[in-house]
Image (cartoon, helix red, strand yellow):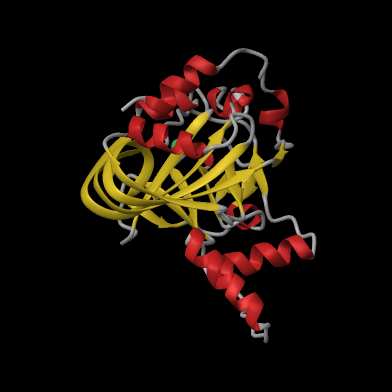
Amino acid sequence: MPELRCAISRSLQDALEARRARTGETLDHIVMAALADALQVDHATLFQISTTGALVQGVTGEAITVAELSRHGDFGLGTFAGLDGEMVVLDGATYRVGEDGPALAPADAQVPFAVITHFLPQRQVTLEAVASLADLQAQLDLERGSDNEFFAVRIEGRFEAVRTRTVGRADSPTEGPATLVEAAAGQTLFAFEQVEGVLVGFWTPTYLQTVNVVGWHLHFLSADRRGGGHLLACSGRNLKAALQPLADFRMAIPETPAFLQADLSSDMRQALEQAEKQG
Ligand SMILES: [Zn+2]
């Protein structure tokens, strides 16, 4: 990223330091958010390609490349064509977590579904003790001011235990592309203990249940980038959580024959629940 050098008044510097001490935000984030506001740059748009309902129906082919997706943000999650691994986008780098663990995804890798934003957290909290994923979700819920907008969350620290999964490519030559439920059935499970890492995730309102994974959806990446995946369980102490409310939502509909001709009218909540929570 380009670097900015400029002179500012003493009073602005004092105000910056006070904000930094209060929220724990980095100087970069405070200045970028302020500049984006002043210059009316869209900095809090959540961009999504395709829908979870389409994944459930087996619309898992190409929709957008990693390079195109990354123009819409530096922080996100998703999957890859053929449901071939879990995606984690962190600090502008896109990782594919496959059966062998994470690796940087090539710029031309195809993405059937993803959610991404420019991460500029507005509040930070320390989660002193997290006993389980359900406990983590309940503690994060207390930091949300609404059930009806999106939130991005980044949680960092040393985890006592983490369990993740990655979906596996399960296309059949005769039956066609795997649906999300089939790919989840062929998942690979990972378990980590005493691991430094980051959770990347989003909270989606219930009224969007055929569009995205409602509630908290979290993907993990270890600090050494050797482990990761879709989060199934976790525990830890003194975890730092940073949250960003997102009220500006943009969804791109893939103009592919597979998407345009799919029957997306049925209620796919049960199938999605099964695919996202099992393990
Ligand atoms: Zn996931």
> Residue 3, position in %: x, y?
61, 80
Could you say which is closer to the camera, residue 153 or residue 226? 153
Q: Residue visible at 67% across and 18% down?
A: 263
Q: Residue visible at 26% across and 36% down?
A: 131
Q: Is residue 60 above or below residue 156?
A: above
Q: Name the image quarter holding residue 185.
A: top left
For the N terminus, the quadrant is bottom right
Q: Name the image quarter holding residue 39.
A: bottom right
Could you say which is closer to the camera, residue 212 or residue 271? 212
Label count reads 0
Q: Residue visible at 48% across and 23% down?
A: 174
Q: Residue visible at 26% across and 45% down?
A: 236
Q: Does residue 232 appear left or right of residue 94 in this picture?
A: left
Q: In this view, does 79 lie above or below 38?
A: above
Q: Does residue 20 appear left or right of residue 235 in this picture?
A: right
> Residue 175, position in %: x, y?
49, 22
> Residue 227, position in %: x, y?
31, 51
Q: Quadrant of ligand 1?
A: top left
For the C terminus, the quadrant is top left
Residue 167 seen by the camera:
no
Residue 35 seen by the camera:
yes
> Residue 144, position in %: x, y?
53, 37
Q: In this view, does 125 lie above or below 26?
A: above
